[in-house]
Every structure is written in structure tokens, then in C-alpha cells.
């Protein structure tokens, strides 16, 4: 019965998300007024907000944006029914500024969040990141933990134990991105239960993911990955309640399992059959997130 209820709620949220998306912004005309931006140390950061209650801040994954990660999946409208929900386009993405220098990214992507909180006079908030956004959140937990009531790591659990192999991957993927390609990343995150993609599928996926985007800015984002590294000792010391959500067909699942071994307080939810790309659209994702937020209201924090 609980599963049926969750699916009905997600279908309703997804329908609302589709309607909001069709109108351009969540909440129709009112939300057009909520489509805002602010200056974050010289870089324009675009954000939207809707709803009332404890603040929840959402940061999307690499090459994605507010619409693709949060609105079309129904997550933004679902949360906005009970929370002051704020989503931002990360620098280098969406309608935010797009510097081409590596130094403009790394930790600065996390500081955009705390600067946005200052801009909105928010002392503490729940923070939710998916994929790249989760890596940003993990670093924030080690640098600005006092600003967060809870943290949710979706699809990724922090850039830990950086290796030569990690650096080679970043070098390869950033070089490909300079050419407007996502080949290596697509192969790395391809669902484990599916046959390898064809050349035609790789070209199609790259074209879809990068349509209308700035490959040079995205390459700089990728090159800054080593600047977001955290250690397992730092994550072990985190006292903020942390939720991890990952699909069982996501190659990052093993990273969550390793983090759980050194961070017992991590609440780990796995979504059966979900891949890195499909997990946010599954009803289990929003159900787990809402249950976690409800269990840790801001009034109880600190």
C-alpha cells in the first residue's frame, strides 16, 4: 500500500512538474517572479524558489540544470508543497555564469551555496545534491557543516581517495568535453544491466546532453574535480545527519558502501534496478528524501 501511495504521489508531482516546465517555471506566473539571480564573487548564479517552511536547497548533476534534474522529475514541486524549496543552476551550467578557468570552480561551487544562503538570509538549510551536486555537498560538509540541518548525497558520495586513475579519467573526459563529447562519461555511467552502447547511441547521448551548452565551461568544471577531494577521515568526523540514495545499477553504489563502512551514521537507501540516470525519477527517491527531511526538522537542529 505504501508503494502504491508513493507512486501516486510521484505521478502527481511529475504531472505538476511537466505543467510547470511547460509554462517555463515552477508555479506558473508567480514563479516567473521567483526566477532570480545573484552575484557570487563575480559569477552570476541563477536560482528559483517556491513553497514555505524549512529551507531545502537543491544542486543538480554535471551537464544538467534546474529543469532537467528537479522540475521534470517532480522533485521540486513535491518538496515545495511542504518546504521553502530553492534550486540553483551550478556555475558553468544552465542560466548561471560560465567561466572557462578551472580556478573558478572546485570549492567555489560549494561557496555559491553558502553565498546564496547569505543572500537569502538563511542561517541553516537542508542541502540535497545529485551526482556532481553530491560531490559539492560532501565537500561542504567538511568546510561549512554548521550551515546545514541535513545533507542528502544522491548518486555520488564525495571525491575520496583521489588516485592516478581518477586523474587520468578527468584528463580524458575534460579533453573530450573540449571537443563537445561525453563518450567516456557515458560509458562509465552506463547501466550495468544493459549491453554496451553503440557508436550511434554514444553520439546521440552526447548531442542530447550538450545541446545549447558551453563545452569549454563544462571542461573547466571537470578539470576542477581534484579541487573537491575530501578524505574518509573528514567524512567520518561529520556530525550532520546524512542520507545517501543510489540505484543498484549505479557504478557509484560501491562508493556508498565504502563510505558507510567508515561513516556508520550514513542512512543509505538503494533503489532496485535504478541506474545513475534513472534514480531521481523513481518514486523511491522522493519518498526516501521526504521521510528523511521529516525525521530531521530544522527546529530540532543544533
Image: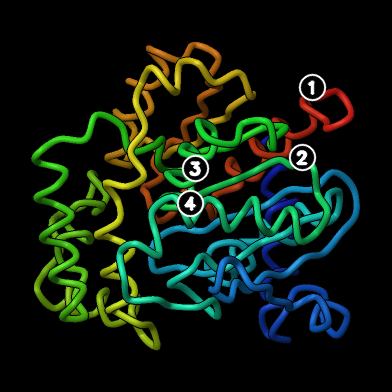
Give the residue pinned by disc 4.
Answer: 133
Q: Marks 3/2: CA distance?
A: 20 Å
N-terminal-most mark, 2 or 1: 2
State which tag comes first along the sequence, 4 or 3: 4
- Residue beneath label 3, please? 154
Residue 42: x and y, percent? 55, 73
Mark 2, residue position: 124
Labels 4 & 3 near each other (Cβ < 8 A): yes
Q: Is residue 53 left or right of residue 266?
A: right
Closest to the camera, between mark 3 and mark 1, is 1
Q: Residue 116's x, y, as percent?
A: 69, 59
- Label 4 or label 1, whichever lies nearer to me, is 1
Q: State whether residue 130 is above or below residue 233.
A: below
In this view, the residue in front, 265 or 163, is: 163
Q: Which of the labelled discs sits on residue 302, or is there none?
A: 1
Residues at marks 4 and 1 touching, judged by CB atoms closer than 8 Å: no
- Left or right side of 58 for 190: left
The answer to whether residue 201 is visible is: no
Pair 4/3: label in front? 4
Q: Nearer the viewer, residue 230 or 8?
A: 230
Q: Quadrant of residue 35?
A: bottom right
Q: The N terminus is located in which quarter? A: top right
Q: Residue at x 17, y 62 (%)?
A: 173
Q: Nearer the viewer, mark 4 or mark 2?
A: 2
Front-lying residue, 56 or 269: 56
Callout 1 secondary element: loop
Amino acid at each position: 500500500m505504501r508503494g502504491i501511495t508513493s507512486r501516486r504521489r510521484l505521478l502527481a508531482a511529475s504531472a505538476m512538474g511537466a505543467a510547470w516546465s511547460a509554462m517555463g517555471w515552477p508555479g506558473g506566473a508567480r514563479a516567473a517572479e521567483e526566477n532570480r539571480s545573484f552575484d557570487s564573487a563575480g559569477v552570476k548564479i541563477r536560482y528559483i524558489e517556491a513553497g514555505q517552511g524549512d529551507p531545502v536547497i537543491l544542486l543538480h548533476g554535471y551537464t544538467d540544470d534546474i529543469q532537467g534534474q528537479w522540475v521534470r522529475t517532480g522533485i521540486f514541486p513535491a518538496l515545495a508543497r511542504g518546504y521553502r524549496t530553492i534550486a540553483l543552476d551550478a556555475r558553468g551550467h544552465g542560466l548561471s555564469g560560465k567561466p572557462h578557468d578551472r580556478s573558478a570552480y572546485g570549492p567555489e561551487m560549494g561557496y555559491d551555496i553558502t553565498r546564496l544562503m547569505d543572500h537569502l538570509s538563511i542561517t541553516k538549510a537542508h542541502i540535497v545534491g545529485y551526482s556532481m551536486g553530491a560531490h559539492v555537498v560532501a565537500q561542504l560538509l567538511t568546510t561549512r557543516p554548521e550551515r546545514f540541518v541535513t545533507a542528502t548525497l544522491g548518486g555520488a558520495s564525495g571525491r575520496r581517495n583521489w588516485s592516478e586513475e581518477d586523474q587520468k579519467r578527468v584528463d580524458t573526459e575534460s579533453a573530450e568535453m573540449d571537443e563537445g563529447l561525453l563518450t567516456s562519461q557515458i560509458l562509465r555511467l552506463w547501466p550495468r544491466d544493459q549491453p554496451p552502447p553503440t557508436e550511434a547511441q554514444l553520439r546521440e547521448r552526447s548531442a542530447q546532453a550538450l545541446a545549447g551548452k558551453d563545452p569549454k565551461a563544462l571542461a573547466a568544471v571537470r578539470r576542477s574535480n581534484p579541487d573537491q577531494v575530501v578524505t574518509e577521515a573528514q567524512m567520518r568526523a561529520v556530525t550532520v545527519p546524512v542520507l545517501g540514495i543510489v540505484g543498484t545499477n549505479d557504478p557509484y553504489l560501491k562508493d556508498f558502501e565504502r563510505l558507510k563502512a567508515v561513516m556508520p551514521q550514513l542512512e543509505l537507501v538503494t533503489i532496485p534496478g535504478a541506474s545513475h540516470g534513472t534514480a531521481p525519477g523513481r518514486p523511491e527517491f522522493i519518498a526516501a528524501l521526504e521521510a528523511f527531511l521529516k525525521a530531521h526538522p530544522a527546529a530540532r537542529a543544533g
